[in-house]
Amino acid sequence: MTVRDLLTHRIGLERGDQLWYATEHNRDEVLRRIRFLEPSSSMRSRFGYQNVMFLAAGQIIPSITGKSWDDFLTERIFTPLGMKDTNTTIRTLSKSNDVSTPHQKVDGKLQPVAWRLIDNIGPAGSINSNVVDMAQWLRMQLGNGKFDGKQLVSAATLDETHTPQTVIRREGPYTIFYPDAHFMSYGMGWFLSDFRGKKLVEHGGAIDGMRAEVAMIPEANVGIVILTNVGGTLLPQFLTYRIFDSYMGQPTRDWQAEALPKIQALEKQGAAAQEKALASRVTGTKPSLDLKEYAGKYNSEMYGDVEIKLDGGKLTAEFGPYFNGELEHWNYDTFQVKWRDRVEGNGFMQFSLNARGKVASVDMGAMGNFTRVPDKK
């Protein structure tokens, strides 16, 4: 495996984001545990989005320089570019009064939500910035690595990051986000496609209550930064196209209106899937065992421990700093868990019994199976 592989989403692993999003594992521990993620394809055979590999690339920096990724970026990127209000952790934001508050739909209503601490995946997306600072970053990108008369990155190296490395099949959601693209690929940290006959270099990013879009067309010497404090919105992508059209003298086109029917169709599919799950509930059932028998610790080699407790006649789940909540019986040995952090919505926990009729494991959906840890005697 090479550094190029780490930066081009082609190592055969996809997602596994709960490893960093849902836990307090530090960067080294996240990297240690990613080995337990099942491959989705063979190495270098196809595109598969994987944030943890960017963490792996970032952790090469301290092993070579002795400086953290955070300090290295400040020294080599933020300071030379004059990005005075840019940092790598939300812990810094509490010292400022001039900071956006994230917003997200929670239980169907748009409302403020807390900043999400994601230091443990830092190199993949923990940078906090503003449009003024990000414009400096774009000037360096469009200037072939040069800024304020100084060559910060060699033109050849920068060009390589803008060069296709991994082919992306234009299917599914990509047909919505890139409606007119004839080709799609991934460079090194950039999505690459064609727009109005020119190469488009761009990347979006999102975390609880925030969404960003950075895009440029090098041939036209133009770049755009759009930062929003609303999670889940697709406006930045389509607004980017609208601005590019205006800059390049193209006819006005409502990109978002064109995409809306497809977006609504996807939303209907999601709603239908939820309705199907509700309809499949078998009423009149009860758990196989007394509730106290489900209480205990369960372990996943990848994600860590989840603890089920019996408190006041009700089961609760505790998993990391965010996924804590009450379990309500759904059917048979399946429970619905209502997470206290309502940004996470609801989930399901399905318990399985062994041949002796004892609880052996619990399935937590996207995070897979957690095995019961024997009680200490």
Image (cartoon, grey):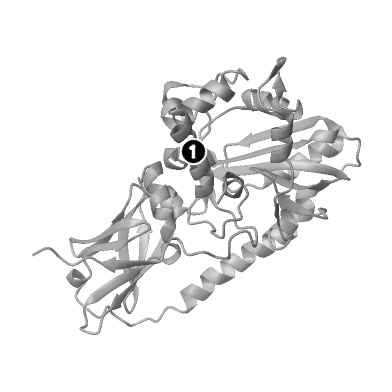
Q: Is residue 114 visible?
A: no
Label 1 secondary element: helix
Q: Amino acid at mark 1?
A: Ile
Q: Is residue 309 above or below residue 283?
A: above
At x 63% / y 66%, what residue is drawn? 268
Q: Is residue 132 visible?
A: yes
Left or right: residue 226 compared with residue 184: left
Asked where in the image residue 262 lies, by quadrant, the reply is bottom right
Q: Nearer the viewer, residue 279 or 169?
A: 169
**Residue 141 locus on image (x, y percent):** 71, 30
At x 55% / y 65%, what residue is drawn? 40
Left or right: residue 13 compared with residue 45: left
Q: Nearer the viewer, residue 109 or 229?
A: 229
Mark 1, residue position: 60
- What is the residue that sits farthest to the left in this orientation? 377
At x 52% / y 45%, what residue is drawn? 104
